[in-house]
Amino acid sequence: MTKIKLCGIKTLEAIAEANRLKVDFVGFVFASASKRCVTLSAALKLKSALNREVKAVGVFKDNPLSEILDIFRSGAIDIIQLHGYSEKDVLALKSAGGIVMRAFNDPLSLEEITSSAADLILIDARKSGSGELANWDGLKSLKRPYFLAGGLNSDNIKEAIETLHPSGVDVSSGIETNGEKDIKKMEAFVRAVREAGK
């Protein structure tokens, strides 16, 4: 079954829905430039309400490695998701005990993706969080398991899964209305993923 990650979670209402839907991951954004950014105290509150079976992923861009490790060690997140960091950064965080998901944006270097030491791989559109689709054609020859992100919603997710067979899918803007998480859209997306996996 395709793993499901609901990203950019900011409210206890959205956490409650993620718990009800029994998704695999939720994402807390710590990148200060993002409209979905949360503070560490907010993330800890959200994590305390999250079902233990659901893993919390911290999303980082331009954050210092020391800050990333502090957040990881606080217990607010289970996995570190890196946007725009180097392989050296991946290794540094792993050596400090972190579980790392490295995001790659279009244009893709399949060799770099395949050889990455990251525990998990995420493939995103050219501009993360833009709602644009990733370049699906470039992914058809990728052998390594990966999470697909970028412009996904309940209308196109069935085609994405049947075309690319990603190990997981990641959605944020596709489950929002006016910039806020929409419970009905969350439910519709999860249902569409599970139906596509049958």
Image (spheres, rainbow, N blue to C red):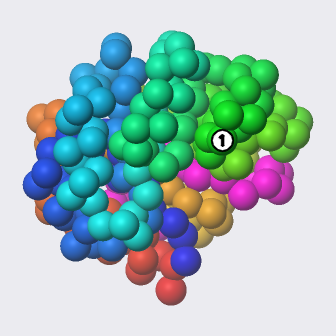
Residue that mark 1 sits on: 97
**x, y (%) of residue 18?**
26, 63
Image-quadrant location for residue 110: top right
For label 1, the crowd category at 10 Å Cα-Cα, with few meaning under 14, some 14 to 19 and many 20 or more, is few
Res 188 visible = no
Q: Residue at x 32, y 21 (%)?
A: 34
Report the side of 164 relative to 91 (left or right).
left
- Residue 127 vs 192, above or below: the answer is above
Placement of the N terminus among the 4 image quadrants: bottom right
**Residue 66 sits in quarter:** top right
> How many numbered callouts?
1
Whether residue 182 is situated above or below residue 154 in the rendered picture: above
Q: Image check: 47 left or right of 122?
A: left
Question: Which secondary structure class fits the magenta region best?
Answer: loop
| Amino acid type at mark 1 | Gly
Q: Between residues 20 and 111, which one lies in front from this camera angle?
A: 20
Which residue: 29% across, 50% down? 47
- Can residue 162 be found in the magenta stretch? no
Is residue 91 positioned above or below 34 on the image?
below
Percent across and percent down for residue 111 are: 88, 36
Tell me which corner region of the image, top left, top right, bottom left or bottom right, holds residue 65.
top right
- Is residue 12 something one can see in this rendering? yes
Which residue is at a point 66% across and 41% down the rendered structure image? 97
| Element under disc 1 | loop
Depth check: 138 or 7 in front?
7
In the image, which residues are magenta? 140-158
Q: Position of residue 57 (x, y in %)?
A: 45, 45
